[in-house]
Each structure stands twice: as structure tokens, then as C-alpha cells.
Image (cartoon, rainbow, N blue to C red):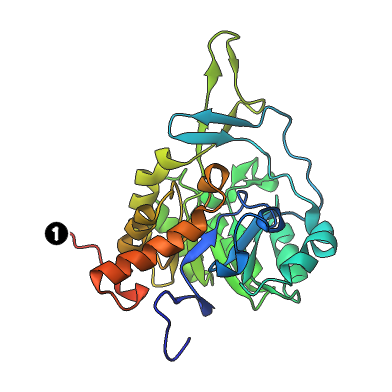
Amino acid sequence: MLETPLPLTVDIGGLVLKNPVMTASGTFGYAMEFDDLLTLDRLGAVIVKGISLEPTPGNPPPRIVETPCGMLNAIGLENVGIDGFIDTKLPFLKRLSVPTLVNIYGKTVDAYAELAERIDPLDPVAGVEVNISCPNVTAGGVAFGVQPEMAAEVTRAVRSRTGKLVMVKLSPNVTDVAEIARAVEAAGADAISLINTITGMAIDIHTRRPRLANITGGLSGPAIKPVALRMVWQVAKAVSIPVVGLGGIMTAEDALEFLMAGAAAIQVGTANFVNPRVSMEIIDGIQAFMDAEGIDTVSEIIGSLQSG
């Protein structure tokens, strides 16, 4: 923790960020893809796309469909695998002055644990974001994140293998997201991010076939913002660890809503596809709001929602 915080500085589970704007996994590649489009070192943190133990080709196309106020994707977590990440992606990330978090996923608890162990000695990786929306093959394909016990088991396994920041990314496709949040907090998570995409689908009425080869996909973008905002508010009240909000954030105003709802930081996702410089605009917009309102530090905004 900085003794004299800068106006936009936030602390996420002991990791100090220069501002609360992070990039969402799966929407920002491995950061190098955006190097010529914005000033990466201005970001609060970079979260790279999900990494598995082995390279993953992902799902067959079509894998992306635009929907009203959003996007459906069924990429299938395509990635280069942990060895490919270390060999071909990490050298670029070492050049950045901002923290990097690696999103990880697996089909077994042991896979998550092994990934955490492989990442633990890596510089400049500051932590892992644990994607628990993935299917557990030993439990008949049930997503780890839909049951508190399973979510906690993954969190404990990751926590036991790394001393870096452990942030667990929650699925919105659950009955009680606060219950899941409390379970991962008790299991050792340093922070929680939410929400991941909402399961949806689209149909071509002329061919009478699904628009995605995978049939269903993850809905993101402005359409899910009200749901994400509500869940962030619920979880922020339910846990004592920092909450990072995401889901449909397109503007600084959107980001400020999440901060007021209790998020200590935010992630920008689908908006990156529309405007690659949107993160810079959101950082500037938050600062402009603070200047206009006479607010000295962003911590004065976090959790400031007045209800009741």
C-alpha cells in the first residue's frame, strides 16, 4: 500500500495499481496486439487471455455473432498453452511497466494447481485470475463456478501453489453469486472479479440453424451491464476482499457506476473491439469526473452508492 496514494491509485489484494482500469481477459489478446493502438503503460493492469496447460485450438467457426447491444462468442478459450505463453508472449509483457495478470483455466482441479505453480516464478506476472466458468470433466461437465464447494476447491488448490495475487472470476450463471463469492473468499482468494459472460444463443431464421457452430456462447457488451452491476453490488456487500467489476463497460460513466456499486477496480472487455483506445478514454473520464466533483482520490468513489 502506498503511504501517499495518487488520485487514481487503488489496492487490489495488496497489488497497487496506478488506476482502476484493467483489461478483461479474452478481449485484449496478450497485450502486444494493442501496442500500436494505445499507451499500454497507462493502464492499471493487463489481463491476458485464458491460458491452459496445453495449447487449445478453440471451437470451429463461426465463433462470434453480433447481437443487439452486445456480442455472443464461442471462441472456446483458444490459446497457446503455458509453454507457448512463456516462450512467445512473456518477453513482450516484461517490457511493460504495468502489472500483468494471467487468466487460467482447466478441466480438473489439478490442472488449475499446476498452472498456478508454473506461473508463480514468472516475472512480471503479478497474479492469476482464475476462470471457474469452465467444465469439470470429473463432475460430468458441471462448471466449477456453479457450486460453492467446487469453486472453493479450485481456489484452495491455486492458493496453495502461488504466493502471487489470486483473483477468482465468477460466473453469472448461478442462483446465488454472493454465496459463491463468500466460498472463494474463505478458500483464500485475494480478490474477486465478476461477471463472466452470460450464456446465450442466436438463430438464423432463414437456415433455421444456430448462428454459432457451438450453438450457445457467452453474451457480453452493454446488454449485460445492468446484470453485472447488480451482481457486483451484491458481492461487494457480501465479502471483505476487493471486487473487480466488468460487464458492458463502454464509457467512464459506466466505470464510475461500478465503482460506486462497490468495485475497487474495473475491467474493459467487449468495448475494446469497438474502440481500441477506450481504456485510455475511461481513465481520462474518471479523472475528469473527479476534478469536476472536487474528489481527491478514487477511493472516495468506491462503494459510495447511497441506497435506502
Q: Is residue 283 above or below residue 274?
A: below
Residue 236, image x and y in percent? 36, 64
Residue that numbered label 1 is attached to: 308
Q: Where on the picture, by quarter, is residue 296?
A: bottom left
Q: Element at badge 1?
A: loop
Residue 108 pos. (x, y %): 70, 53
In the displayed structure, does residue 209 sit left or right of residue 177? right
Whether 67 is drawn above or below 270: the answer is above
Residue kind at label 1, given as amino acid type: Gly
Q: Is residue 83 above or below residue 187?
A: above
In percent of width and height, residue 25 lies at 60, 54
Question: x, y (%) of residue 36?
Answer: 67, 56
Foreground residue among 41 and 242: 41
Residue name at image x 74 percent, y 30 percent: 60
| Quadrant where the image shows the C terminus | bottom left
Q: Which residue: 52% across, 80% down? A: 14
Q: Residues within 10 Å of mark 1 (few under 14, many from 20)?
A: few
Residue at the limit of the structure toward the left, as seen here: 308
141 lies left or right of 298: right
- Give the quarter of the image for residue 48: bottom right
Specify the farthest residue to the top: 206
On screen, residue 225 versus residue 21, left or right, reads: left
Write the residue at 50% across / 60% down: 280
Say which residue appears at 75% left-offset and 49% top-offset.
79
Q: Is residue 177 visible?
A: yes
Q: Is residue 262 visible?
A: no
How many badges with numbers are in the image? Answer: 1
